[in-house]
Image (cartoon, helix red, strand yellow):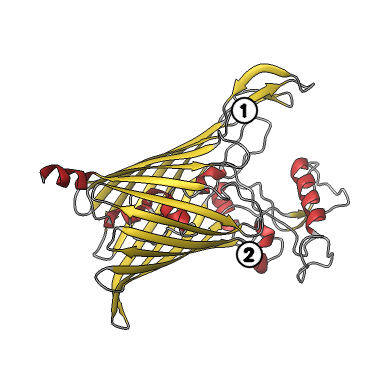
């Protein structure tokens, strides 16, 4: 708790010089006047877009047309997928401008059971590169370790009507950042969690000014799971439980050309850090006294509920915790795609703002997607990095073998 207070204190001092103040809801302008107040979670790799298609569309994928990457965005979309069997692999370099051994790899696949049901699975693996342990004097001990995190998913999707489907996914998460080394004299361990997703998807044909198309809506509450910790002496942390609501509009301009527009809204369903008194006040247990906001050390169900009303700045700050993704996709002959997008996060909640772009090529058997990210206001681990995804259509492979 003391570490959290110190970090908040430093962030407030820095942000006083970076952001214009807004109307505070408290008498003390130091407590909350537009300062940085980021919602922190463990295992944030779960929130990174694993595929280049959505990554090129500003990380929008909740309601786009179903594809093999639907596991990450909205498992309910699998029920509407065209083919019976498919798989994909994607690779994302991380901090490529600084180091070459940190990356995110993603493997996923699905199989249709019948006209109503689809099963899917995926593996997400995040390698943080090789580190060398040192002693208290900063001398290398000769021990080396590669921190890593991974998640294994399984999902079930079912069609309920011609226009509506639902899906559930179950996830095992493991994060090993220390190799069980002693950190500040305390034994550490790998953190583990079990989580679930609940999702729905709706789509319907429309006609807009004599242009046929499709309107789709999607919602996914993802990573509903237990809090994790890396040692017995550390407070357990929330994993990135997230509420995502998305929409997309596809317009079939003619027999050769189509355009899709997508918009996603996301909000973390975890407690917002409160603001503490800065005069050293403590409660009977020796913890700092909260000046505004609510106690973040609550259960997972309470944390999800509390996330809608616990921001120290009230409703205005709650709205700032919604981040937006907007994307566009153009297809020619359903074989070549051009994509672009924009991602927006409020200045006081992380200030991630970036444009994205990419292309896609779809052949009879495989599809290749490429994405590129350009930051606006701050550095990003994926800035100026090419990301690749490769998908395989086994039904197309079977068709090719019969020709």
Where disc 2 sits, the SS reads helix
Viewer-side residue, 401 vs 13: 401
Dot 1, how many residues are within 10 Å of its Cα: few (below 14), some (14-19), or many (20+)? some
Which residue sits at x=57%, y=34%?
Answer: 128
Numbered tag placed on residue 178 in the rendering: 1
Q: Compared with residue 364, is residue 131 higher up or lower down, i.e. above or below?
A: above
Q: Is residue 227 left or right of residue 264?
A: right
Label 2 vs label 1: CA separation?
34 Å
- Residue 310, above or below 124: below
Residue contact between numbered discs 2 and 1, judged by CB atoms under 8 Å: no
The image shows residue 176 at horizontal and vertical percentages of 56, 30
Is residue 212 visible to the viewer in this orientation of the structure?
yes
Q: Position of residue 269 (x, y in %)?
A: 56, 55
**Residue 105 position by quadrant:** top left
Q: Residues within 10 Å of mark 2 (few under 14, many from 20)?
A: some
Question: What label sits on residue 320 in the rendered view?
Answer: 2
Query: Tag 1, which secondary structure?
Result: loop
């Amino acid at each position: 708790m003391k570490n959290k207070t110190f970090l908040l204190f430093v962030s407030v001092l820095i942000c006083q010089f970076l952001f214009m103040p807004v109307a505070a809801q408290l008498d003390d302008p130091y407590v909350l006047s537009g300062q940085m107040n980021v919602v922190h979670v463990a295992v944030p790799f779960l929130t990174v877009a694993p595929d280049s298609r959505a990554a090129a569309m500003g990380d929008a994928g909740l309601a786009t047309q179903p594809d093999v990457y639907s596991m990450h965005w909205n498992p309910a979309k699998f029920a509407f997928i065209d083919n019976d069997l498919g798989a994909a692999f994607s690779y994302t370099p991380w901090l490529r401008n600084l180091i070459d051994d940190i990356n995110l790899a993603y493997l996923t696949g699905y199989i249709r059971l019948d006209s109503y049901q689809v099963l899917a699975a995926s593996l997400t693996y995040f390698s943080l590169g090789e580190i060398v342990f040192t002693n208290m004097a900063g001398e290398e001990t000769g021990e080396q370790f590669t921190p890593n995190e991974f998640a294994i998913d399984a999902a079930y999707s079912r069609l309920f009507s011609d226009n509506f489907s639902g899906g559930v996914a179950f996830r095992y998460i493991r994060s090993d950042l220390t190799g069980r080394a002693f950190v500040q004299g305390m034994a550490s361990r790998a953190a583990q969690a079990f989580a679930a997703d609940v999702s729905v998807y709706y789509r319907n044909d429309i006609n807009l000014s004599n242009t046929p198309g499709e309107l789709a809506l999607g919602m996914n509450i993802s990573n509903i799971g237990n809090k994790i910790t890396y040692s017995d002496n550390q407070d357990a942390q929330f994993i990135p439980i997230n509420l995502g609501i998305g929409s997309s509009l596809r317009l079939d301009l003619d027999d050769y050309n189509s355009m899709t527009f997508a918009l996603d809204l996301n909000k973390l369903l975890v407690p917002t850090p409160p603001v503490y008194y800065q005069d050293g006040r403590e409660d009977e247990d020796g913890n700092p006294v909260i000046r505004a906001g609510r106690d973040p050390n609550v259960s997972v169900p309470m944390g999800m509920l509390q996330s809608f009303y616990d921001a120290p700045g009230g409703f205005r700050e709650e709205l700032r915790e919604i981040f937006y993704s907007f994307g566009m996709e153009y297809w020619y002959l359903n074989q070549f795609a051009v994509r672009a997008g924009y991602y927006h996060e409020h200045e006081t909640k992380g200030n991630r703002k970036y444009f994205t772009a990419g292309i896609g090529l779809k052949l009879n058997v495989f599809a290749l997607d490429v994405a590129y990210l350009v930051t606006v206001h701050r550095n990003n681990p994926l800035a100026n990095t090419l990301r690749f995804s490769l998908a395989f259509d086994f039904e197309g492979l079977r068709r090719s073998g019969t020709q």
